[in-house]
Image: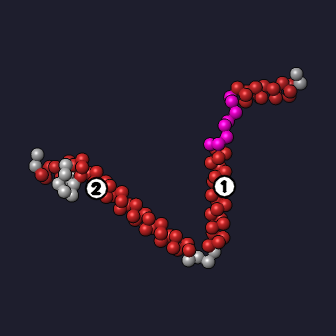
Amino acid sequence: MTREAGRHEGVEGPDGLDSLEGRAVLLVAGVADLAMSTLGSALGTVRGLLRRSDVTELAAEAEADLVARGRLVLDRYGAVPPAHLEVLARHATARKRADGV
C-alpha cells in the first residue's frame, strides 16, 4: 500500500502513528477545541449578562424558571403511577355507583 492510498483510508497521527491512534489523537484534539470555543462563548455571554442593569430581575426569573423545571421533573419521575388494576377497580366502582347498584 502506498502512502497516498493510506491517506485516503485513514488519518495519520501527528507523530506518524497508524490510523487508529492518529484518529484518536485528532478526536481528542477536536473535542478539546470544541470545549474551549464553547467555554469562550459562554464566558462572553456571562460577561454580557453581567453588564445589564436588570441583572437582579433576570436572576430572579432564572431562579423561578429553574424551580418550575425542577417541579416538572419531580412530578414526571418522582411520583409512582397507580397500579393498572387499581385504576380499573376505581372505574368499576364509579360505574356501579353511577348505575345505582
The answer to which image quadrant residue 52 occupies is bottom right
Q: Main secondary structure of the magenta part?
A: loop
The residue that mark 2 highlights is 26
Give the left or right position of residue 56, taking residue 19 as reference.
right
The answer to which image quadrant residue 60 occupies is bottom right
Q: Position of residue 14 (x, y in %)?
A: 21, 58
Label 2: which secondary element: helix
Q: Name the residue at the right extreme.
A: 100
Relative height, residue 1 to residue 80 (above, below): below
Circle 1 Cα neighbour tier, 10 Å, few/some/many (<14 / 14–19 / ≥20): few
Give the left or right position of residue 60, taking residue 51 as reference.
right
Earlier residue among tags 2 and 1: 2
The residue that mark 1 highlights is 68
| Amino acid tagged 2 | Leu
Q: Position of residue 41 (x, y in %)?
A: 45, 67
The answer to which image quadrant residue 36 occupies is bottom left
Q: Name the residue at the top extreme.
A: 101
Circle 2 Cα neighbour tier, 10 Å, few/some/many (<14 / 14–19 / ≥20): some
Residue at left 63%, top 69%? 58
Label 1: which secondary element: helix
Report if residue 16 lies within the magenta region.
Answer: no
| Amino acid tagged 1 | Ala
Task: Specify start and end residues of the magenta stretch as a single range.
Answer: 77-84
Image mark for residue 82: none
Q: Name the residue at the left extreme.
A: 2
